[in-house]
Image (cartoon, rainbow, N blue to C red):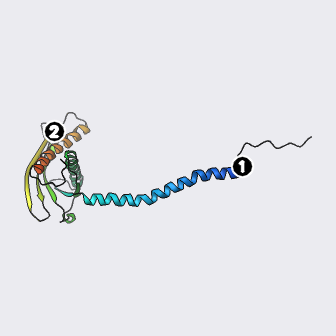
């Protein structure tokens, strides 16, 4: 029986495979290295921009009857609605939440809200009512007044109720925004 001849192999040689891997891996390594080096620079630039923008501190005081377990959630939710309204209406600065009096920075203005009511009434409306004052960096306080907003719930579903709470807060925040702009108390308003 004659010896069997090896069949022709369709596989690439080892040298060809290494060259192919180098052409794929080396550009990927260069790209990843560039990304690693660029990331701290990009992060530094965005933080510098954030510090250059005007910062308004927002402090929300809740009524004494609010459950302490939900106190921060309620304050954060109202704060988000205020910040969203300000951004939508043209505020170009940063709105920082301040939950504790010790966290207030004296070199930035403070918009202090005293929430009076944010609840559903017997007629199916959600009412949001708060007073507001702005404390300047020089220590002066300007009382802005009382602001109220209402929205109706259209259905029994939980998201209908959520939308009504958001709408009532937005309506009150719109009134607050109009007062702040009318009195020219926000320096970072884009016309």
Q: Nearer the viewer, mark 2 or mark 1?
A: 1
Q: Could you tell me which secondary element the residue under label 2 belongs to?
A: strand
Image quadrant in which you'd find residue 142: bottom left
Residue 161 point in image, percent of width and height: 22, 39
- Looking at the image, residue 69 sits to the left or right of residue 143; the answer is right
Residue 100 lies, with reference to residue 92, above or below; the image says below
- Looking at the image, residue 128 sits to the left or right of residue 2; the answer is left
Q: What residue sits 27% from the left and 60% below the top? A: 51
Q: Could you tell me which secondary element the residue under label 1 belongs to?
A: loop
Q: What residue sits 49% from the left and 55% below the top? A: 32
- In this rendering, the count of numbered labels is 2
Residue 107 point in image, percent of width and height: 18, 65
Image quadrant in which you'd find residue 112: bottom left
Residue indicated by mark 1: 13
Q: What residue sits 69% from the left and 52% below the top? A: 15
**Can residue 130 be seen?**
no
> Which residue lies most toward the top here?
154
Q: What residue sits 10% from the left and 47% below the top? A: 147
- Decide: few, some or many residues near mark 2? Use Cα within 10 Å; few <14, some 14-19, many ≥20: many
Residue indicated by mark 2: 151
Q: Nearer the viewer, residue 155 or 85?
A: 85
């Amino acid at each position: 029986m004659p010896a069997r001849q090896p069949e022709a192999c369709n596989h690439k040689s080892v040298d060809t495979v290494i060259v192919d891997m180098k052409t794929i891996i080396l550009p990927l390594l260069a790209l990843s290295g560039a990304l690693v080096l660029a990331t701290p620079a990009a992060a530094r630039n965005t933080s510098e921009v954030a510090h250059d923008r005007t910062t308004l501190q927002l402090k929300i005081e809740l009524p004494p009857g609010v459950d302490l377990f939900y106190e921060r959630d309620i304050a954060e939710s109202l704060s988000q609605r205020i910040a969203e309204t300000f951004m939508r209406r043209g505020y170009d600065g940063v709105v920082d939440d301040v939950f504790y009096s010790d966290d207030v920075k004296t070199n930035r203005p403070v918009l202090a809200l005293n929430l009076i009511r944010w609840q559903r009434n017997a007629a199916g409306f959600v009412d949001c009512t708060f007073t507001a004052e702005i404390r300047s960096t020089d220590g002066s306080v300007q009382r802005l007044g009382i602001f109220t907003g209402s929205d109706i719930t259209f259905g029994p579903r939980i998201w209908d109720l959520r939308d009504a709470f958001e709408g009532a807060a937005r309506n009150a925040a719109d009134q607050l925004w109009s007062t702040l702009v009318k009195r020219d108390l926000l320096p970072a308003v884009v016309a």
